[in-house]
Image: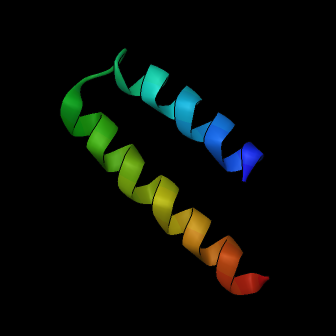
């Protein structure tokens, strides 16, 4: 959980530094990849 929270915080920091559409796209892919990792486990 701590690792996920750290990544989540860093992600929002990055989110604030790039355009909203690109951030939304990256967010979607980020959570999609997370879902795949969870499924693999």
Q: Is residue 17 left or right of residue 2?
A: left
Q: Residue shown at 51%/33% (left/top)?
A: 11
Q: Position of residue 18 (x, y in %)?
A: 33, 20
Q: Quadrant of residue 40?
A: bottom right
Q: Residue shown at 55%/40% (left/top)?
A: 8
Rendered view: 28 above or below 41: above
Q: Residue shown at 60%/64% (left/top)?
A: 34
Rendered view: 8 above or below 25: above
Q: Position of residue 13 (x, y in %)?
A: 47, 20
Furthest toward the front, the residue is 1
Rendered view: 16 above or below 11: above
Q: Position of residue 21 (x, y in %)?
A: 20, 37
Question: Considering the image in quadrants, where does the C terminus appear?
Answer: bottom right
Give the number of callouts: 0
Q: Position of residue 27 (x, y in %)?
A: 39, 48
Furthest toward the right, the residue is 41
Rendered view: 32 above or below 7: below
**Residue situated in front as seen by the camera: 32 or 13:** 13
Question: Considering the image in quadrants, where does the N terminus appear?
Answer: bottom right
Q: Is residue 14 left or right of residue 33?
A: left
Q: Quadrant of residue 39?
A: bottom right
């Amino acid at each position: 959980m701590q690792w996920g929270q750290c990544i989540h915080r860093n992600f929002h920091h990055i989110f604030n530094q790039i355009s909203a559409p690109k951030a939304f796209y990256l967010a979607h892919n980020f959570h999609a990849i997370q879902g795949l990792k969870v499924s693999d486990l």
